[in-house]
Every structure is written in C-alpha cells, then in structure tokens.
Image (spheres, coloured by chain):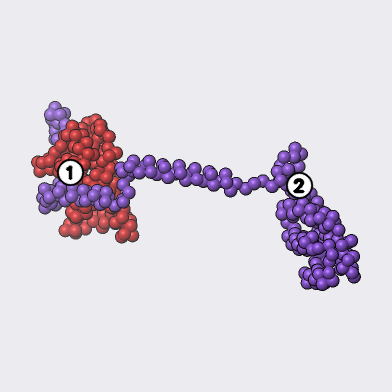
Chain colours: A red, B purple
Amino acid sequence: MEQRNGYVNETEVEYLVERIKQGDKEAFMKIVEGYQQKVFILAYSLVRGREDALDLVQETFMRLYEKIQTYRPGENFNAWLMQVARNLSIDFLRRQKSRKKDSLDALDLERMNLLSKDEDPARFNPGEMIHKAVTRLPEKQRLVFILHHFEDLKYEEIADRLKISVGTVKSLHFKAIRKLRKTLAPQLGGGLE
Amino acid sequence: MNKCHKYKKNWVAYLSDQLEPVRSKEMEQHLKQCSACQREVEEINKLFSMTADFKAELNEVRQAVDWERLPVVITDRAWKTEEGKKKKPVFSWPDRWKWQPLIAGLIFGLLLGAFFTYLIVKPQKSAFLAARQNSKVSVPADFVERVDLALARRETIDYLDRSQYLILELLQTRKPDEVSTILTRDKVQKLLTEKKYLNDQLDQVKLLKAKAICDQIELLFLELTQLSPELTGAELQKIREMIGERQLLLKINLVKKELQQSEV
C-alpha cells in the first residue's frame, strides 16, 4: 500500500525521535516520510482542499520539530502527532469561518437542507456531504471513522494505534455511523428507528 | 423485532467485515429473513457508498501529490527555520558561562563601590535630631515638631528683640566714642554665640524669613567686631547707612510680627 511505503514502527519511532533531538536531519525526514500521508488524510478529511491539506501537513511537521524536545519516550507518538494535525486543522477551519463571517454549521445545515432528496440529483455531491458530516463527528468517532474508511485499517489495528480496546473501536464506529445516518438522513432516504 | 435488537449494533461491524466468521454467518442468516434489518443494511451501505466516493476523491488527490519531494521540502524548511533562530541572537545563551565570571566580578565591584560610597556620603544625623531620637520619652512626632517650632520662634523673637535694641542704640548715638560703650564686645559676642545656637534650630524648622534676617544681623555684628574700638565719625555713618540700606529695623519688626502672629 502506497501510504505504508515509509512506515515506521514504534521502536523505530523512539529511536528516530531521539536522533531528531540530537539534530539528525535524516531521522526527521524518515518520520515525515512515515507519517505524511496519515496526516494528509486527516487534514483532507477535515478541510477538503488539496493545497490547504498539504499546508497543514507542513505545519504539522514544523510544529512537531519545534516541540520534539517535549516528547517523552513511551508516549503514543502517533496519537501525539495526530493531535497536532487535528488542532491545526481545526484552527484553520476556525480562521476560514471567521474570514467568511459565516457560521460553518449554519452553512452546512443550509446546504444539507437545500440538497434534500427532492432536489435535482445532479446537485447532490456525496463526497461533499460525507465530508461535512464527518467534520461534525465527535473527536474519537471521527478518528475511528477516518482510520477505518480512509486508511483501510482493521479494528485491531485502530485499537493498537489509538491504544484502546477493540470493543471500544467497534462501539465508536457504530456510534459514528449512527450519527452520520442521522445527519444524512435526507440523502440516505431513510431514518433511524 | 425483538430479535433484531440483538443484531442491530453489529450491522456496521458486519458490513465492515470485522466480525468473526461464525457471528457473520449468523447475521447473514438473519438478514435473509428480516426486512427491517434489510432496510437498515441498505441504508448503511448507502452511507458506505458515499464514504467510498469521498475516499475515491481523497485517493485521487493523494496520487497527485509528490510524496517523495514533500519530506525534503519540509525537512529543509524546518532546518532553515532552526538556523535562522540560531543566527539571530548576538549573545547566545550556551556561551554565557564564558561571561559569567566577568559579569559576577562587575556586579560585585558595583556593590562594593556602592557600599563604600554610602559609607562616605552617609548623611550625618544632626545633634538636634539625635538628641530627639535618643530621648526616652515617647510622644507623637508631630507634637514634638510643634514644640520645636514654638521654641524656635520664641528664641528667634528674643534674639531679634535684643538685636533690635542694640541696633536702635547704635543709631541713636551721636558721638563715635559713645559707640564703644554701647557696643561692648561682650554684648555682640553673646548675640553671635546665640545666633550660632539658633542656626541649628532655624535649619530644622521652617523659618526661612527669620533665618534670612538673623543672618543679616549676624553679618552686621561680625562687621562691628572687626572695627577698632576708636570708631571714627565716618565709620559710624557707614554703619548707619548700612542699617538703613538693608532696612534692618523694618525687617526685624515685620518678622517679629509674623512670628508672634503665627505663634498665636
């Protein structure tokens, strides 16, 4: 799989982080290679713009480099990095929202209402709909949804990466789908009982 | 429907192919018979299909990115920023230990200098203040101040009275040889000594006008002590003119009046 080309395991991450702390450029590049696509997927799922997502990838790794001295061995590096990416993406969305001086949520609802099932199907963009709905999911549910559907990770792999149990992953996935079904009920042509 | 409840929470995992084969088989069997669950599965499938659309879009975008170049770009940017940060400070903190002895020496020198300067120019307590502080009687500070002021006023008035007396006698004298009988060295010297004692008090309390006039009187008396006992007519005239020019008697009267009024 393409995104796993630069895959780095946990032990390797610890070693690479130590090397970066000592100023090793190659080690930093390896970390970027290993995690860039994961960060991109998360950022793109939230901002849905190629250039914006790529900027966020750069910002995430720049922030990682600035804060690398605060990383302590044994911490969940992946979760740490994804948290940075998520925060930057949310900040980006906030800035965009204030720039437009328009409530994103209000806009979403408006669009969703406009695109009811009675409307012209040509105007219905499933990609956009799902993206908007995913951004409104609670943090953990969104992460599980993205990892499973966009990164093709199995429940066990997600549990391992997020350091939670498989049962929790299953529950979070179920809740995410239930919420999405609720939000997208007009487009799905049904409703939750 | 009750049976459905058992399966409801598992349809997502079933469609995601995340169930054990046995459980999956069981779900499949139920699905064949249950129309409500079929509708549910159909809806979830629709959602998954929408997700797949977004995923297709995401993959398309991902394929258009040069993933080999991006790490190089990011790494270069990070290192450039770091180098920029390192270049900025002229005084770098890692080198500070080199400067520490010098800085410590300077600070120590400054402190030592300040201490000795203080010792040299340390304001000396006047005898007047010291006496006041050494007294064991504890009274409010403003009361002591008022008493000091009143005493200073009285003594100044007394001094001015006697000086005025002496000056008047001097002005009324017709013959220069009579002056020596009026201006005995004792009288003048006594007034000069008294003035010295008064100086201290006049400095402490705010009696500026009184101090100015007392100073002028003192100057006059000092000049008188310099004169020879056998005063010439011209010299006597000169003294009278000086008293007149300086309007000493008028000033003494005014100051006395002022002091007496403020005393009331």
Quick check: B200 left or right of A43? right
Q: How many marks?
A: 2
Query: As drawn, which residue projects farthest toward the top?
Result: B22
Residue sitting at x 76%, y 47%: B144
Residue drawn at point x = 41 percent, y = 42 percent: B104
Image point (80%, 51%), residue name: B151
Report the quarter where the N terminus of chain A lies: top left
Label 2 element class: helix
Q: Nearer the viewer, residue A186 or B248?
A: B248
Kind of residue sitting beneath label 1: Lys
User: As rendered, which of B72 and A179 lies closer to the eye?
Assistant: B72
When the figure is inspected, residue B262 is found, relative to residue B23, above or below; the finding is below
Q: Secondary structure at mark 1?
A: helix
Chain identifier of the residue bearing label 1 in the image = A
Residue B10 numbered mark, or none: none
Q: Position of residue A177 (x, y in %)?
A: 23, 41
Q: Mark 2, residues whose alpha carbon is within 10 Å: few (<14), some, or many (≥20)?
A: few
Which residue in the protein does label 2 denote?
B144
Check disc 1: other Cα within 10 Å, few if <14, some if 14-19, many if 20+: some
Q: From mark 2 to mark 1, how far is it between C-alphas?
A: 79 Å
The residue at the point 57 percent across, 44 percent down is: B119
Q: Position of residue A12 (x, y in %)?
A: 17, 34
Q: Nearer the viewer, residue B210 or A129?
A: B210
Quadrant of residue A176 within the rendered picture:
top left
Looking at the rendered structure, the kind of residue marked 2 is Val
* Residue A3 in sight from this viewpoint: yes
| Chain that bears disc 2 | B
> What label does residue A25 carry, if any?
1
Number of the front mark, 2 or 1: 2
